[in-house]
Amino acid sequence: MKRFLLISLLALLAGNLSAAEQFRVAWSHYTGWEPWDYAEQSGILRKWADQEGIEIELTLVNDYIESINLYTAGEFDACTMTNMDALTIPAAGGIDSTALIVGDFSNGNDGIVIKNGDSVKDLKGRTINLVELSVSHYMLARALEMNGLSERDLKPLNTSDADIAALFASDPNGAVATWNPPLQQVKKAPGAKLVFDSSQIPGEIIDLLVVRSDAPDTLKRALAGAWYEVMDVMSGDHAEARQAIAMMAETAGAGEAEFRDQLKTTAMFYDADEAAEFARGDQLKETMEHVRQFSFDKGLFGAGADSPDYVGIAFPDGSVIGDESNVKLRFNADFMEAAAE
């Protein structure tokens, strides 16, 4: 009888272990998202998942936009993306999503480089290569606005980020809006001049980890806990931090010095308290006002949108901009604050 009970208990335990909820997280290569790969390789992500009694599968999707499309289609429970893309792809597509982690903002990782010119105003009448409707396009729109110009004053040409550097090098009158690492390449071309970069609009191009709003707290706690443990490691001045940076550089396909240069123009929120404070700040609301206006003007909300209010955006203080009955993008500071504790 005792033997039967023991076997039954072991079978029950095995059943519970095999029934652990499984979740899928997508990420793509970018300076501010390379820490996710380190979280997996170091065992930190699994440790936090085990602590919450769940399983997390981390998947690298080399095509950034495709990763977001797959998340929107239900293939993933969480995905790395910018604030603009979170609004215009999953949120505009009806997927209620939460910005769980504010990882960083571009602080020079995106820029406008031209030949035969010294300022943004020298773009007038010229063709500029860029990935159309990307955050670089948004940066260009903000740069033009700040310099008394509009897109009607030039000719944006949709160009793959893989081709931008080569096209710029071969064009004696080249002009590009792009991000790192292509930005690092074009700045080195003879006659190139950086006339604007994202450090002039700090806090506007934000890199996030976005999760489905109905995902359980176990997943949200595990992801936040793992992320900020990695932030603690890589921000230190010790052998483990140097090893982590070297591993991220290798994963990114960059030399360690090059990767460290990219980190310098990435305003990482290594401290969870600072990230939560940013999410609760008024600047985020102002930024999302710019972003939603740009998105509507470019038709990124779809044919059914008749105003920028089409999608509601909720903030940690409970306020909403846009349609309160159609809130699909939520900024949440709770799990960042919990990680800080």
Image: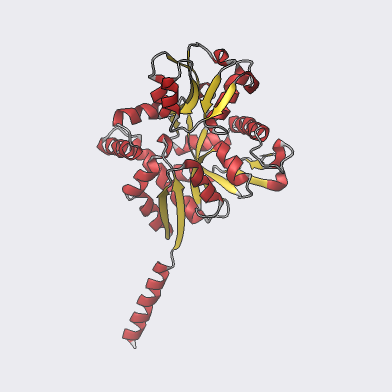
Seen in the image, is 96 located left or right of residue 324? left
Between 283 and 338, the one lying in front of the other is: 283
In this picture, is 182 found above or below 339?
Answer: above
Q: Residue at x 44, y 45 (%)?
A: 27
Q: Residue at x 60, y 44 (%)?
A: 330
Quarter containing the C terminus: top left
Residue at the right extreme, as displayed? 306
Residue 12 seen in the figure:
yes
Q: Position of residue 275 (x, y in %)?
A: 49, 36
Q: Residue at x 52, y 32 (%)?
A: 131
Q: Residue at x 39, y 26 (%)?
A: 264
Where, by quadrant of the figure, is residue 14 drawn?
A: bottom left
In this picture, is 194 found above or below 305?
Answer: above
Q: Position of residue 215 (x, y in %)?
A: 54, 55
Seen in the image, is 21 located left or right of residue 150? left
Q: Position of residue 243 (x, y in %)?
A: 27, 38
Quarter containing the N terminus: bottom left
Seen in the image, is 334 located left or right of residue 313? left
Query: Count the marks: how many?
Result: 0
